[in-house]
Image (spheres, rainbow, N blue to C red):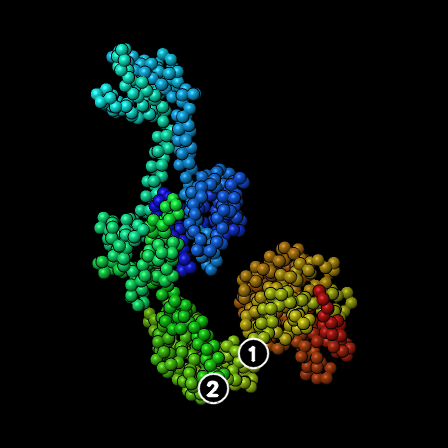
Amino acid sequence: MSGGPRPAAPGPLAGDWFRTVAETTAAALFVYDQTRFLYVNPAACELTGFPEQELLLLLRPRDLLLPEQVDALARYRPDRPLASPATRRDEFVMRRKDGDGRWVLLTTTVIQWHGRTAALGTAHDVTERIWAEEALRHSQDRLQLAQKAGRSIVWEWDVASDRMQLSSFAMELFGASSSEVPRSGEELMRFVPPEDQELIHRTLRRTLHEGKPYVLEHRILTPSGQMRWLAVRGQVLESERGVQILGVSADISEHKAAEEALLREQERAQVTLASIGDGVIRTDSLGQVDYLNPIAEQLTGVPLAEALGRPLAEIYRVVDEESRHPRPDPVTRCLAEGQVVVLAEPGVLLRGDGVEFAVRDSAAPIRDQNGSSCGAVVVFQDVSQLRRLEREMAWLAGHDPLTGLLNRRQLEGELDAALAAVRSDGRHHVFCYLDLDEFKVVNDTCGHVAGDELLRQLAALLSSQVREGDVLSRLGGDEFGVLLSDCSLENARRIADKLCRTVRQHRFEWEGRACDVGVSIGVVGVDAASGSLAQVLSAADAACYVAKEQGRNRTHVYQPDDRAVAERYGEMQWVQRIHHAFEHDGFRLLRQPIRPLAAGGTEMAEVLLRMVGDDGTAYPTASFIAAAERYHLIGSLDRWVVYRALPRLAALDEATVFTINLSGQSLGDPAFLELVMERLRSSHLPPERLCFEITETATITNLARARHFLAVVRAAGCRFVLDDFGTGLSSFAYLQSLPVDFLKIDGEFVRHLTGDPVQRALVESIHEIGHLMGLITIAEAVEDEETLEALRAMGLDYAQGYLLGRPEEL
């Protein structure tokens, strides 16, 4: 094993093929430094018994050693420079997870692993060999002590009489009793297997005929059925007594077992070398080939028999991937420098039949016992498929796989470069942000396959309408971007309008269905006065949104004083603040009293939501509710309030009835209904102490789902307040169909109650109709005593406003 070829350490660009080889080879591979493991393959996990994550995250290399052998690994420092001897072998006991110790042969090589110096260790379990070698040493020791301790048989055989005398150790050697020990050559043969008897006879005839020493190894079979090997040496002695052979027989069974173990180890090494996925070529010190493994034969197209003795360059012909010029011979450099050579870039291996393979390779010196280079080994891997994947990945890194256009990342790079250039060259470009109109209809009615096909068709259509040199990209979903080079805003508007017309006129048909889509385009100039990349993209997005708000399928050109875009920015800022508040616990719950206007009435209070900025500024719900509704965040706010408020209300030691506002989006969300019911159960809040406030406009918009929500929650014991009543056009028409308990009259009517007879009449009529329907009436926005007395005179049940109490922390 020590003289055979060794796999080379992975270079900086060899990670993928190295990982492929490492995870399929039977050898245990470790990449480590002084403090931790950087990589282990499956065979390493199997050898140590530790899972990969424990090795990489929890263990140090020294943790795998027995305490008395910690220094064995420390002798080799992976931070030594590559100019020092690159490969080292150590044998030591490795500690497994189950506590067992296994002898391993660790071949260690200094490598560069992702920019850092580390060690690559290849470990083989040599426990059986070590045990066999130890057994062999013990056997040899016994042979040396045979004369002193009687561990060997000293025997004398009289040829003529066939009588045989054996020393006292014979009983143990033959595993027989004193009466069973052979006393003649004939009896001895009964212990010898038939296949070994001819060998004994042949050796004996030669000894007697030629006078040569009697030397052989044969087996005996003990009475217990155990097979043993004997090493027999004898010498013919002629005397007046006749011809005798004097000799010694030693039990070499353990020696034989060690030999067989070593043979199996060598065979396993050869099988491993032949079965790994890398090509391996070994050369002598002159660079002439003396070995190829089967993979090398396959890739080079040259059989081992034809390759022996030929220069490496004739067998392993590699050219540069780009220039196609022959690459330098790695073995020549390896032998000259005496260290591992890893070629940074892959090359192309030319096989004799014209087939080519992309290969990554390295060469390592083979050293003799004196440390001198006696040859080299080249290890190379077919990375043709990997190179194809690398080229595909490089293309995908900058392109949209569906349409083939540049992707958002590439477009942003182009736009960023344009912004950097215009500050020095004074040129003017334009960026257009395109968002398809009604694209969701195509996906919903025809399916996503149809939507993908429409995107491909529109990509080709848009590509045909932009100028040469312009940059068209798909930003994601149904959004596209166009960077118009050296273009004025006036010309850009004409191009954008043409794109709008082109998309609108495109007729898309799918399985007999015809679908029409449009496109809204935001246009923004790119010149020395432009801001950052993010600002340009944001301005274009806002302008596109304005185009949609103004009717869709049109163009909106961004101007620095654009009011519509400014409003869009304002809403986006509120959206960012809402997200920030969710992430940083920026919401607070408050309560405002709702006072009964008659004695003995139940106290009520409305739960209000405030958002607190990082600077401590408190924002009432009215300031951010419009942005939350437009960008579909209102449902998240409702969930936050219900989740946080119900346990707090349950903990209050009072009989107050609390009201919580809900949006129309939440009324139509089955998941929100589940949340309300779950929090009612888990908080143990009595349902009669809880009311939900809903607006008539939100309820009418989602009437069917609102009725279901109200029915389920009312069945649980909660009640409902119809908020802002009177602002809708059909309030009284829908009132009978909604199962509510309270009417809260809109504050615009109440606020002008005492100075406007019409407003007073409206409030009175709402109150009277509410009472006729069995509803409790609440007036909001009560801010002065005169209004309060007027409401009390009308007979209203409750009032709410700053006069009766301002919001305070819940």
The tally of labels here is 2
Q: For mark 1, what is the residue?
A: 569
Can you say which quadrant of the picture contains the C terminus?
Answer: bottom right
Q: Check the image and report above or below for 263 versus 410.
A: above
Q: Check the image and report above or below for 684 versus 421.
A: above
Tell me how far mark 1 sits from mark 2, CA to CA: 28 Å
Mark 1 Cα within 10 Å, few/some/many (few <14, many 20+)? some
The image position of residue 598, as x and y in percent, is 76, 69
The image position of residue 27, as x and y in percent, is 39, 46
Mark 1 in CB contact with mark 2 (< 8 angstroms):
no
**SS type, badge 1:** helix
Q: Which mark is residue 426?
A: 2
Residue 541 visible to an observer of this rendering: no
State left or right for residue 520 relative to residue 3: right
Identify which residue is drawn at 48% across, 47% down.
Answer: 51
The image position of residue 282, as x and y in percent, is 31, 50
Q: Nearer the viewer's eye, disc 1 or disc 2?
A: 2
Of residue 650 and residue 723, the one placed in the foreground of this image is 650
Can you say which quadrant of the picture contains the N terminus?
Answer: top left
Q: Earlier in the sequence, mark 1 or mark 2?
A: 2
Of residue 770 and residue 655, the one placed in the foreground of this image is 655
Identify which residue is drawn at 57% across, 62% down.
Answer: 672
Identify which residue is drawn at 44% across, 76% down.
Answer: 414
The image position of residue 104, as x and y in percent, is 44, 41
Of residue 74 and residue 754, the one placed in the foreground of this image is 74
Residue 668 visible to an observer of this rendering: yes
Mark 2 Cα within 10 Å, few/some/many (few <14, many 20+)? few
Q: Check the image and report above or below for 42 versus 575.
A: above
Amino acid at dot 2: Gly
Of residue 600 and residue 800, the one placed in the foreground of this image is 800
Identify which residue is drawn at 72% across, 63% down.
Answer: 656
